[in-house]
Image: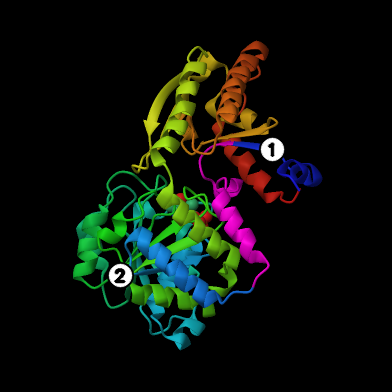
Amino acid sequence: MTAEELFRRYGLTRVINASGTMTSLGASRVIPEAIEAGAAIQSEFVRIDELQARASRVIARLTGAEAGFVAACSAAGMSQSVAACVTGANLARIERLPDVEGLPDEVLVQAGHLVHYGAPIEQSVTITGARVVPLGTAARVEAFHLEDRIGEKTAAALFVVSHHVVQEGQMLLADFVAICKGRGVPVIVDMASEYDLTGPIALGVDLVVYSGHKFLGGPTAGIVAGRKDLVRAAYLQNRGIGRPMKVGKEGVVGTMAALEAWERRDHAAARERELANVRHWMEALAGVPGLRLDIHPDWTGNPIDRLKITVVAKEAGLHAWELADRLASGRPSIQVRDDLIEHGCFFLDPCNLTAEEAAIVGRRIEEEVASAQRRGDGLVVSLSERRKGRVEAGLKWPD
Ligand SMILES: *Cc1c(COP(=O)(O)O)cnc(C)c1O
């Protein structure tokens, strides 16, 4: 069956994804190598522990870690990592979670790192029975906050590298690791969306978690890498709380294939293709009234430049969120990166787009602004209404 037939048969909406790698949109285009590997193993039996031990070698090679395994996703990988720091490789304790009585059960997290990536990160911790001890306040966390909360009950410290976190006033990873290392506290780093596969391990981080289905273009999966004893303890959680977050054989080999392809990929050529999309938008949208255009490098240093579109509502004839929603409700549905929409801006992410799709995005933005100006039907939805509407729409599923 072709993709076209699939979309027709189930009445699915075609999506042009200008928002980046979003789990809720199917994350990324899975690369052919990962699709082939996943398909090849589907009809076969395999010893999963052996397959995961081979995955460990690939993950170790790419991250510089001692060992690794493939989890269901990053959120699952974090839960299994936290659980590892609570139970160690003790099978009785593993089977007992989320009962943590008598075990270290505190996970230290900077207040500005308590993010929501579709679900709160805190829940990735609490699902194990452990609990989060927030450090400092939203935009101010100092070393003394961390030092003060390390104690007998500390199981681990969790650090998040992401555009989601508060970008100001948080501790730097190197300082965070240095303090934790000095006090014997394992550090887990959430790198779900970060291209840097080697940096955290080189800094001495104990466990690091990546998504297989984001920049790597693998199937839905997570990658856990780190110190062998902790990776083993995290893997053994598959006999406990990891069971309802199981990854299949196709996810494991698909992730291995995606990692190997990443090693060989011509990263400069991929970046050039992405930049061409951004340049196209800069030119195509330059004359659209009410839009201010800037090229915006990624917050966390990933090699991605996005187009930032600030909508001057009075000139454009509609609010930024109205434009985003009109693009999303069209056919095909165009999804823009709208996490900073309160500021009257959104971003176009070039990573998942063909040149053809990028051209459609440019045209549609131009048309929506022209249409709002012609009809005078913009500037009617407040931000507050928009937010309420999105929550309500979610609650109506499956209708
Ligand atoms: C996407 C994301 C996650 C969740 O990743 P999944 O693999 O979809 O579970 C967690 N943390 C951060 C920072 C993310 O960007």
| Range drawn in magenta | 17-44
**3D distance between C-alphas at marks 1 and 2:** 44 Å
Identify the disc placed on residue 14: 1
The three-letter amino acid code for the residue at tag 1 is Arg
User: Magenta stretch: residue 36 in it?
Assistant: yes
Q: Residue 42: image x %, image y %?
A: 65, 65
User: Magenta stretch: residue 244 in it?
Assistant: no
At mark 1, the secondary structure is: loop
Tell me the residue that label 2 is attached to: 186
Q: Residue 274: image x %, image y %?
A: 46, 33
Which residue is found at the position 66% from the left and 18% from the top? 377
Tell me if residue 383 comes above or below residue 183 in the rendering: above
The residue most toward the bottom is: 92
Rate crowding at label 2 as few (under 14), some (14 to 19) or many (20 or more) other CA atoms within 10 Å.
many
The one of 9 and 394 positioned closer to us in this rendering: 9
Q: Are marks 1 and 2 in contact (CB under 8 Å)?
A: no
Which residue is found at the position 60% from the left and 54% from the top? 35
Rate crowding at label 1 as few (under 14), some (14 to 19) or many (20 or more) other CA atoms within 10 Å.
some
Which residue is found at the position 51% from the left and 36% from the top? 337
Q: Residue 322: image x %, image y %?
A: 59, 27
The three-letter amino acid code for the residue at tag 2 is Pro
The one of 235 and 142 positioned closer to us in this rendering: 235
Q: Residue 320: image x %, image y %?
A: 53, 27
The one of 115 and 8 positioned closer to us in this rendering: 8
Tell me if residue 259 comes above or below residue 280 in the rendering: below
Q: Is residue 119 visible?
A: no
Q: Is residue 371 visible?
A: yes
Identify the disc placed on residue 385: none
Q: Quadrant of residue 372?
A: top right
